[in-house]
Image (cartoon, helix red, strand yellow):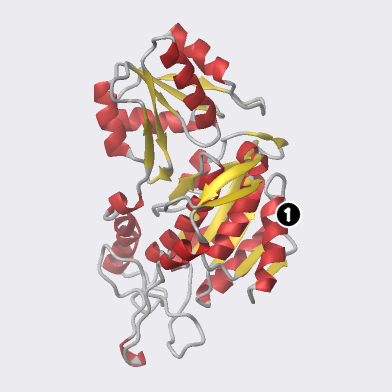
Amino acid sequence: MSATREIISSGNELAAIAAVDAGCMFFAGYPLTPSSEVMHVISDLLPKKGGAAIQMEDEIAGVAAAIGAGMAGIRTLTATSGPGMSLKAENLGLAQMAEVPLVCVNVMRGGPSTGLPTRVAQGDIAQAKNPSHGDYKSITVCAGNLAECYTETVRAFNLADRFMQPVFVLLDETLGHMHAKAMLPTVEEVQAGIVPRKTFDGPAEEYQPYGVAQDEPAVLNPMFTGYRYHFTGLHHDAMGFPTEEIETCRKLIDRLFRKVEAYQDEIESNEEYMIEDADILLVGYGSASLAIKEAVDVLRAEGVKVGMFRPITIWPSPETRMHELGEKFDKVLVVELNQGQYLEEVQRSMGRLDINKLTKTNGRPFSPSDIIEKVKEL
């Protein structure tokens, strides 16, 4: 997307604005620090567009209502922070199994449990890969600046409808509450790029929502439009009815993986900053990448050749590109506001255990000097 609008706002507000611009017409959630502004803002915006926003009694009810709207064919959003994701987990598993599209914004804070409600962390990276039990392929994007709080939320809605499943947008307390100017695409450009979900328009007796190719998502016509099918979290057949038939169950779970894996190039998005001639590679994401990029600039001015790789699509991880970078760079440093949750994925992708790390879990953000000091140790 080309940046043609200037908006002075916060990350949380931009996520809410993006949802409405992308065609979201329903929000259900529960206020939870530091994500509450998403709900506050969209509650003002949606009624003006003919949509609806509702504060439910808790986070569980919030995602349940959002799933209901997704079943009705409405672009739908819920938003929360880490503890709310834990509560939403069971219903998110239902949405993965039944293939109901929705977007969930998670503004990360310190954890586990109540943790540090008003402080920054990136502790939900591992959770975003598998927020619920069972086998499925998560799609998770991670904003790294204010503009991406908007553009990645827009992209998440398109991905949700394209792949028929929940898509998670990770912000964090720093980005969510950061207030500055963002350069954004126009509303017209966003709406021109909307990817509608597929529907079936043939005879009702021929409709099989889950009877699709092994690398394709389900085709779920909105409920109340004359097409009947069964909706369940159980293993199911082509019509959605529960089954324990061996091959049907195997193919169902296999398809939940393949529908994402077969199109990873379409989903993947990364930023590479000054890595062409670098000797040291820094890997980071989210708000931490802002400090990393400034550290790269300072170190470059001092003659130290460093570069940054930033995954924007966190899951599925950019494992092929990280493997290539692992073969190119002898020295790799992963910087993240947790104890090393993405470090494990970098190690796996690069096929190496000698990856250096710089972590912080006290609720405070990285400063560029933290990173510069660590790089000089290398």
Residue designated by label 1 = 31
Going by the image, does 330 lie left or right of 52?
left
Q: Determine whether, in the image, residue 46 is placed left or right of residue 347.
A: right
Residue furthest toward the top? Answer: 377
How far from the left and from the top, in percent, is residue 307?
A: 38, 23
Which residue shows up at 39% across the image and 33% down it? 345
Front residue (pair 367, 94): 367
Q: Does residue 167 appear in the picture of this structure?
A: yes
User: Image height check: is 378 above or below 320?
Assistant: above
- Residue 325 lies, in percent from the top left, at 28, 28
58 or 108: nearer the viewer:
108
| Figure quadrant of the C terminus | top left
- In the image, residue 317 sits, relative to residue 5, either above or below, namely above
Residue flagged by tag 1: what amino acid is it?
A: Pro
User: Which x, y percent locates residue 83?
Assistant: 66, 46
The residue shown at (32%, 19%) is 278
Left or right of 134? Residue 123 is right
Q: Nearer the viewer, residue 135 or 184?
A: 184
